[in-house]
Image (cartoon, grey):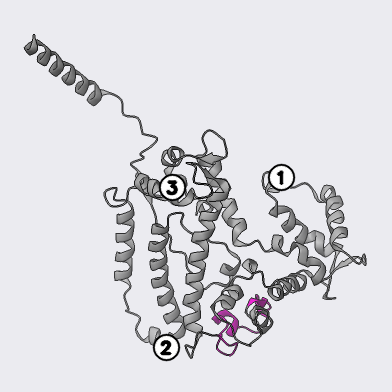
């Protein structure tokens, strides 16, 4: 009887192996073999970057890899900007070792033995699920996690810039030490972008919260990222800049026409519900525009001043918290399969590439999906 049972088990096992080996292969939802993680390399000295928001990687380990790559690129570009004569005399300088490091990092991220996305999410989940620690990740917890990582990266970039500009290395920056970017130094007052005020002395002085004529790291960080500041002088400077940019007739204030053709669209776009609905025609939006204009025009003279614009400056210049919340909302919309507005560990593991993006199909590298809003 025992011998018969052994033969029976062996027969069943062989039959199962045969069926598995000949069954149609369907792609697993949990494991996509052809998905490939990419490292971004987007650093630039371009002035337009001051107005472009670049989110940070969701996973601090990936962010650290990207940070090291960006530091190398930044050092190379800064050297080229500061030592043009030397660079011109040495055109054969090679950057191949940097690219080798770059590719090795991508190989690491795509080696499941060394970097397993599921294991990373299991490790990160309790670090995100903090308030409260109840086995669910809410949109608020996602926002706080993203904001924490973003702020860490932004401080790192500010420290890097501070070290370059702080000529005497005393930990403080004077306006004399600060050098505007090359595109400003090489332009005149008729050039495009010359009047952009973020690099001017008035901005510098507004960032000087303690009024000592120098910027410490915190003040310099806010100088670079005024939208994230709570310094009233800096927020007032932002409002002044907004008036200056919108004041087409140069009378020092904004009329309803100047408000309607620019500022109002920016304020509408700030609200989440406006993102999901198409904008109406100019005639249908004029009434709400006039209503908002009247609310802001405290003295009722038909114009907006820099002081009257202050209540909405946070909507015209969204802070990092706004972008973190947008990213969290998108992640929630993609990974929250039961639509209860919270994520379980299983939902995160089932949707890994919502968190690890810049993904493409290796079988067709020319046709890939890149979703910058994920990062």
Considering the whole magenta stretch, tell me its main secondary structure.
loop
| Contact? badges 1 and 3 (CB < 8 Å) | no
Residue 339 visible in rendering: yes
Camera-nearest residue between 145 and 117? 145
Find the distance from the CA under tag 2 to the CA under tag 1. 52 Å
What's drawn in magenta, residue-wise? 173-198
Q: What residue do we see at 12% from left, 12% from top?
A: 5
Q: In the rendered image of this protein, does residue 277 appear above or below residue 213?
A: above
Query: Residue 184 magenta-drawn?
Result: yes
State the residue position of label 3: 125
Camera-nearest residue between 18 and 171? 171
Q: Secondary structure at mark 1?
A: loop
Badge 1: residue crowd in 10 Å (few <14, some 14–19, many ≥20): few
Position in image of residue 290 (x %, y %): 87, 56
Q: Is residue 50 left or right of residue 28?
A: right
Q: Quadrant of residue 246?
A: bottom right
State the residue position of label 2: 85
State the residue position of label 1: 278
Residue 39 visible in rendering: no
- Location of the N terminus by quadrant is top left
Residue furthest top as drawn: 1
Query: Residue 316 magenta-drawn?
Result: no
Q: Quadrant of residue 322?
A: bottom right
| Contact? badges 2 and 1 (CB < 8 Å) | no
Q: Secondary structure at mark 3?
A: helix
Find the distance from the CA under tag 3 to the CA under tag 2. 51 Å
Say which mark, if any, is on residue 156: none
Position in image of residue 207 (x %, y %): 64, 78
Find the distance from the CA under tag 1 to the CA under tag 3. 36 Å
Mark 2 or 1, nearer chain start: 2
């Amino acid at each position: 009887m025992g011998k018969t049972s052994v033969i029976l088990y062996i027969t069943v096992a062989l039959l199962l192996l045969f069926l598995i080996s000949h069954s149609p292969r369907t792609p697993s939802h949990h494991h996509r073999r052809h998905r490939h993680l990419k490292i971004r390399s987007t650093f630039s000295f371009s002035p337009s970057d001051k107005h472009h928001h670049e989110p940070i990687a969701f996973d601090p380990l990936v962010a650290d890899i990207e940070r090291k790559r960006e530091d190398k690129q930044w050092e190379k570009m800064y050297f080229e900007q500061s030592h043009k004569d030397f660079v011109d005399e040495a055109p054969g300088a090679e950057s191949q070792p940097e690219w080798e490091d770059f590719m090795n990092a991508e190989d690491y991220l795509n080696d499941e033995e060394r970097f397993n996305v599921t294991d990373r999410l299991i490790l990160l989940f309790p670090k995100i699920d903090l308030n409260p620690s109840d086995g669910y990740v809410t949109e608020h917890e996602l926002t706080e996690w993203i904001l924490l990582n973003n702020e860490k990266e932004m401080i790192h970039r500010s420290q890097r810039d501070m070290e370059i500009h702080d000529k005497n290395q005393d930990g403080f920056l004077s306006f004399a030490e600060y050098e505007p970017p090359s595109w400003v130094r090489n332009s005149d007052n008729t050039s495009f972008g010359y009047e952009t005020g973020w690099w001017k002395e008035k901005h510098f002085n507004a960032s000087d919260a303690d009024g000592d004529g120098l910027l410490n790291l915190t003040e310099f960080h806010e100088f670079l990222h005024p939208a994230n500041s709570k310094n009233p002088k800096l927020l007032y400077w932002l409002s002044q800049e907004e008036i200056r940019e919108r004041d087409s007739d140069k009378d020092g204030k904004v009329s309803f026409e100047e408000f309607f053709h620019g500022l109002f669209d920016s304020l509408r776009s700030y609200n989440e519900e406006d993102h999901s609905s198409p904008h109406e025609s100019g005639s249908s939006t004029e009434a709400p525009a006039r209503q908002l204009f009247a609310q802001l025009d405290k003295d009722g003279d038909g114009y907006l001043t820099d002081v009257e614009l202050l209540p909405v400056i946070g909507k015209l210049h969204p802070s990092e918290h706004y972008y973190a919340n947008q990213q969290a909302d998108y992640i929630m919309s993609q990974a929250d399969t039961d639509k209860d507005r919270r994520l379980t560990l299983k939902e995160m593991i089932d949707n890994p590439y919502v968190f690890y993006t810049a993904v493409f199909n290796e079988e067709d590298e020319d046709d890939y999906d890149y979703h910058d809003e994920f990062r």
